[in-house]
Image (spheres, grey):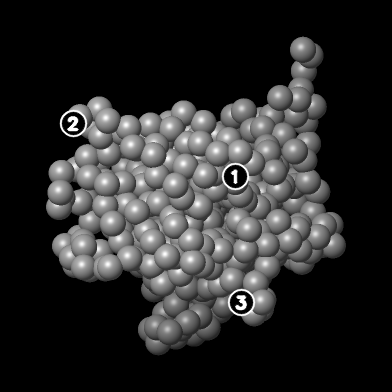
Amino acid sequence: MGEKKKEHYDVVIIGGGPAGLAAAIYCGRAHLDTLLLEKTMMGGLATNTNTIENYPGFPEGITGPELTELFHRQARKFGIKFKMTDVKDVEFRCDSRRIETFRTVYDARVVIIATGGRPRVTRAQNEEKFLYNRGISFCATCDAAASEGKTVMVIGSGDSAIEEGTYLTRFAREVIVSVIHDEPQMDCNETARDAALANPKMSFAWNTIVDSFEGGETLERVNLKNLKSGEVTPYEVDTCFEFIGYEPNTELFLGKVEMSRRNYIITNEAMETGIPGVFACGDVREKNLRQVVTAVSDGAVAGVGAEKYIAESTRFERDILQKEKIGLIYIYSAIDAPSQELLPIMREVESAYGGQVKLSVIDQYRNHSLCEQLGCDVEPMTVFYTVDGEIVETRARCDRKSIIAQLNKLVDDPVDVVESFP
């Protein structure tokens, strides 16, 4: 294969689930040239949900495919480009962010990671035949209503399994829980365990794992194997909920961004990963609740963050580190009186040099990414740079005399502090 095609975008979003689509909508509305890459199905895991009844604005409920298609349509309305392809590699550097697919290399000013996650599965026989809409579910909150009056099975005994199983008893006729441990051991907290054991709708198959799943078009039976006796017992069920863990789709980013012990991407509340211009949102990030509504919220925050980062980076390149004059940058806090009082002094200094010096003022709170690029984490601070844009000094001392002394080393026509400032 020859050299790969190269394309440039303001923003590349990796992942087309609710988080990625929400980020795309915000980027599109901001008139950012945006590309979204998705390797399998637009809409992510939400497309496997029969009914979503807890997403605001749909009191009668809506199917996962219907809701995500609305997201997709709205993103297309704002001019987002979509490509169905698998990302092979990424490289995040200060000067550029590169995303490589089979045929193309994309350079982006901002990358938003929204690759989501996947539930852990048992890998028992025939399991793949019944995943999602055919009888095996991974979200009680999403699919509990569809279990009204039915017999369901829950696999797992952690907090999520037992709490979700207890929740299912509000709808189901019977909830059978397969627990790998001896009676009455579970992996959940004691409060959840005691409540489950006391629930008349819940029964427990101790020391068991799934041996196989059986049925026709949909799931009809789960065969559980006893770990001590080896005996396999069939259970007639309408639905099986698996709660044995969740895995983020982050293999591509190992060693590229900071992750938790479970390989979820760590971000702050602004969805920033700690690498300039790289955001993460949705189920791929370390957080407490993973639902469509929280994924959309994350995506909105990431989209706004992308717009702000690009705007500040453009200002940094064209204005802050301009290459026409000697540069003086003053970093201050709008809520700090002493640093505010220095503002007129900075303007006086700029004026005294008769056009030789360019003053740029940065509010540390409003423009924190600019401060990060300059390596400034306190205020007030001053930064001095040459006509070539080379930073020569960053200092916390902001008095008039020391500032002039430094600028006089850089300009062609120095000023006298006494004569210039009577």
- Mark 3: which amino acid? Pro
The nearer-to-camera label among 1 and 3 is 1
Q: Amino acid at mark 1?
A: Thr
Which is nearer the eye, 148 or 362? 148
Please report whichever mark, 1 or 3, sits nearer to the chain's N-terminal start.
Answer: 3
Report the front residue among 350 and 237.
Answer: 237
Describe residue 112's horizontal placement relative to residue 339 as left or right.
right
Residue wearing tag 1 = 218
**Which mark sits nearer the N-terminus, 3 or 2?**
3
The percent position of residue 20, horizontal first and vertical second, equals: 64, 54
| Left or right of 165 on screen, residue 194 | left
Judged by depth in the image, the label closer to the viewer, 3 or 2, is 2
Give how far across and how far down residue 290 sits, in percent. 47, 59
Label 2 is placed on what type of residue?
Lys
Q: Any mark on residue 37, and which?
A: none
Dot 1 crowding, Cα within 10 Å, few <14, some 14–19, many 20+: some
Give coordinates of residue 316: x percent, y percent: 62, 57
Q: Report whether residue 256 is seen.
A: no
What residue does disc 3 label? 56
